[in-house]
Image: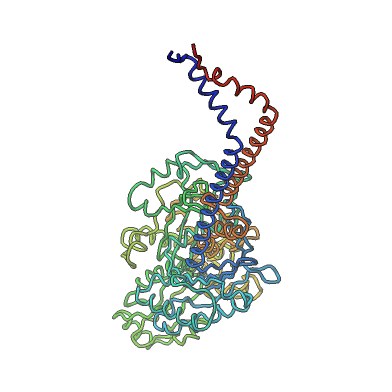
Amino acid sequence: MMPRINVPCLSGMLSQRLQGLLKATAPIWTPVLITLTLLICTILLVTHTLATIHSYQGYWSESRSPLAAEGLGYAIVIDAGSSGSRAHIYVWPPHTGNRKDLLNIQPLRDHSGQPRVHMITPGLSSLRLTPERAGDYVRPLLDYAATHIPAEKHRETSLYIMATAGMRLLSKDTQTAIIENLHRAIGRRYQFLLAENNIQVISGREEGIYQWIAINFALGRFRHGHDGPTVTVETVSDQPIRRLETVGALDMGGASMQIGFEITSAEQLKALEGKVHRASMATINLGCADHDREHTYRVYVTTFLGYGANEAYRRHSEAVRARYTNTTRRLYDPCLVRDFTEPPPVVRNTTACAAAASTAATSSSQSAPATNSSAASGHSGPAGSNCTIPVVGTGDWGLCEQMVRRQIVEERITRLCEVAPPEGCTRTLVPPPVNLTNVEFYGFSEFWYSMEDTLRSGGQYSYSRFSQTAKDYCATSWPTLLRRRGEGLYGTSDDERLARQCFKSVYLTAALHTGLGLPRSYGGLTSTASVVRGRVSTWTLGALLFKLRFLPVRSVEAATFSSFPAGPYGIWGSQYLLLACVLVVLGVLLLYALRLRRLRRGRPRARLLSEHEPMLLGVSVS
Ligand SMILES: Nc1nc2c(ncn2[C@@H]2O[C@H](COP(=O)(O)OP(=O)(O)OP(=O)(O)O)[C@@H](O)[C@H]2O)c(=O)[nH]1
């Protein structure tokens, strides 16, 4: 008779059969499972280790890091500006290990707590005719740095020389000649790390970005948390982010001026549509990972080459001299302090000058009153065909303001391209196409020197207060100013600062209100020295933070390398992985123990069951 199979019972029969099978084979599969789990974990960990070794090696070979594996890291950044070069020395402790933190880079300080900075004048661009003298030029700066950085650290101390507007105004060939000579001379004499692109003429945009980073770092605006003014940022990801509000940076040097501020709203972003403005946008990621939105900032940053205070003065001065006619005996400049006589003007060889020179030569009574510097220069009178008509200050704030404002407005239309794009041509002093009145700005360099040095009006800016102080200053006669300086009123201000302070004060306000279009009632500007709330805020610090921004993640990897490798999700990703592996192994072990216990307890029942196995399997024979 054929056996009859009861179909509805099939699945139950099978599962019971499976259970029986599992029970029977439990002592075999549990150790196999454990071994497999351990094997997979080992493979994963080895893969991570290899990946980490790879990135670790890449790091050292790629940047020849200035980061000391333990102890302090050092770097030297030379700001080679148009008016002089300054060596800044920076130092930082090992990274905290938290990927969210930037390196805690600080200036090296002297015993009184002042940052160690050494300055030389004139600017690096003064080597344009003698580039072979680059080694002699930079030596005082590097000797200074070498003295203050421990000798055993020299080999791991990166040296950066970043030249700004003065060098930007030179031809590419001249720039290259100076840079090559610097490389050769430094390589011969010093041990500092000097990669090929560590000596650079940086763009105005870069300078602006670095200044923006530096001030926000100094003010703690890159911190996490909401212990300060916050803002909703709509411009870095699909979801708005709430974080600390950053401030804008205004930097007026001798030859150029930079502005940088964060674009936070979609509305501002829309206003910046169009090629020219898009070119002024920079996306800065200060995080450790490529797609780190929390640390990504969209910054509007632009530079106005030629709109530094000294270059602006040079053009203003030319405009004054352009009023020269055959009959001019002396020229008057409302922007120079009253009764100051400008040393003989720039050498110009025009027919009119030649005529004036010969006229002046025949009239000793008309020769220029010599000032200290003009006498020293040996050009206190007419010199052949050179135009040496004196320019006398009248210290008239109102007239000067009119002149300077007109200069800015007219230059928007007429200024020729002095330097190849993208730096020069289109960058006349125009307002950015977004409303700046709600932006808080910090002003550097001339914004500080011109407000504070002689006028003692640094800090919170107010047009009415500042212009009144400056108006009084302009109208003070030159001999009175000299006497006051003798009494210690103007600190270390030299003749040039005292004499041009009137122009610079006017220019500063015109740059803000006519150039950048800020209303005179605007009160959001704070001019500041290079130290803000005890923290340094020079652009060189921003440059270093930016250049070393990937060091934190690498140092985390490096620090944890010997104990446990970091994976693609960092050290925490790897730790989670390890934890998961351990939990799985523990779980399997527990299961195994429970099984063994139950097997031991249930052995007689198992035997009993096995006696009835055919029935339990649902096969009945009829
Ligand atoms: N009073 C005072 N004036 C300074 C000092 N350093 C520079 N200046 C003057 O301030 C102006 C701007 O100088 P910097 O900020 O050094 O600008 P720079 O780097 O030479 O100029 P760029 O190349 O355009 O960036 C120049 O006219 C300098 O003469 C300083 O320490 N004190």
For this orientation, the residue located farthest to the left is 351
Q: Nearer the viewer, residue 570 or 241?
A: 570
Say whether residue 83 is left or right of residue 411.
right
Say whether residue 384 is left or right of residue 584.
left
Quadrant of the image containing the N terminus: top left
Residue 440 appears in the figure = no
Say whether residue 413 is left or right of residue 334.
left
Q: Where is residue 380 drawn, in percent x and y?
A: 45, 85
Q: Is residue 266 above or below residue 150?
A: above
Q: Nearer the viewer, residue 549 or 340?
A: 549
Q: Is residue 147 above or below residue 103?
A: below
Residue located at (62% from left, 55% from top): 97
Q: Nearer the viewer, residue 456 or 104?
A: 104
Q: Where is residue 308 drawn, in percent x and y?
A: 45, 65
Residue located at (60% from left, 50% from top): 223
Residue located at (51% from left, 51% from top): 568
Q: Where is residue 94 drawn, in percent x and y?
A: 63, 62
Q: Where is residue 437 drawn, in percent x and y?
A: 49, 47
For this orientation, the residue located farthest to the top is 622
